[in-house]
Image (tube, rainbow, N blue to C red):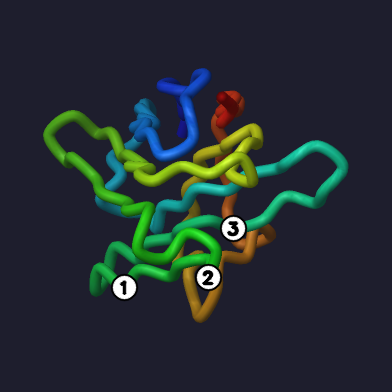
Amino acid sequence: VQLQASGGGLVQPGGSLRLSCAASGSTLNYYDIGWFRQAPGKEREGVLCNRVADDKVVYADSVRGRFTISRDSAKNTFYLQMNSLKPEDTAVYYCAVGSLALINRCDEAKYDYWGQGTQVTVSS
């Protein structure tokens, strides 16, 4: 599976962005999907993960109520909608997919395929 992330950029605090992750090589219908991020000097963390079997979503506490994850099967693409962005959301965002990857939390070790990362900068 090849993943192509896009949609990052510079946005003011309080603004919105939508990241996209286009998949090729296999249908996303077989995979759990996830978004992760890595801020400068910090470890990569799970932001939102979705389990394909029952549509369960796991959120990082820091993004609950502001970020949502969705998938478009027809386009074989999934998205991260980010609203009410804060400077602390600044990071490189990565999309990832994995087979039976989501148990109880976004664990990057469970995800097999990764996109290249897209930079999100929240600043005035």
| Secondary structure at numbered mark 2 | helix
Check disc 3: other Cα within 10 Å, few if <14, some if 14-19, many if 20+: many
Quadrant position of residue 90: top right
Residue placed under numbered mark 3 in the picture: 46
Q: Which mark is residue 74?
A: none
Q: Dividing the image into 4 quarters, which one contains the C terminus?
A: top right
Residues tagged 3 and 2 counted as in contact (Cβ below 8 A): no
Give whichever of discs 3 and 2 has the lower sequence position: 3
Residue 23 seen in render? no
Question: Nearest the camera: 100 or 6?
Answer: 6
Q: Residue furthest right?
A: 41
Q: CA distance from mark 1 to mark 2?
A: 16 Å
At horizontal 46% and vertical 67% (from top left) the residue drawn is 59
Instruction: Please tell me which of labels 1 and 2 falls first in the chain.
Output: 1
Relative image position of residue 117 (x, y in whole percent): 60, 28
Q: Is residue 53 visible?
A: yes
Mark 3: which amino acid? Gly
Q: Residues within 10 Å of mark 1 (few under 14, many from 20)?
A: few
Which residue lies under the disc numbered 1?
Answer: 56
Spatial separation of the CA atoms under disc 1 and disc 3? 15 Å
Front residue (pair 23, 62):
62
The location of residue 104, given as percent across then percent down, is 51, 80
| Marks 1, 2: nearer the viewer | 2
The residue depicted at 53 percent of the width and 66 percent of the height is 60
What type is the residue that disc 2 sits on? Asp
Compute the Cα span from label 3 to label 2.
Answer: 10 Å
Residue at image mark 2: 61
Q: Going from the N terminus, do you reach mark 1 or mark 3 first?
A: 3
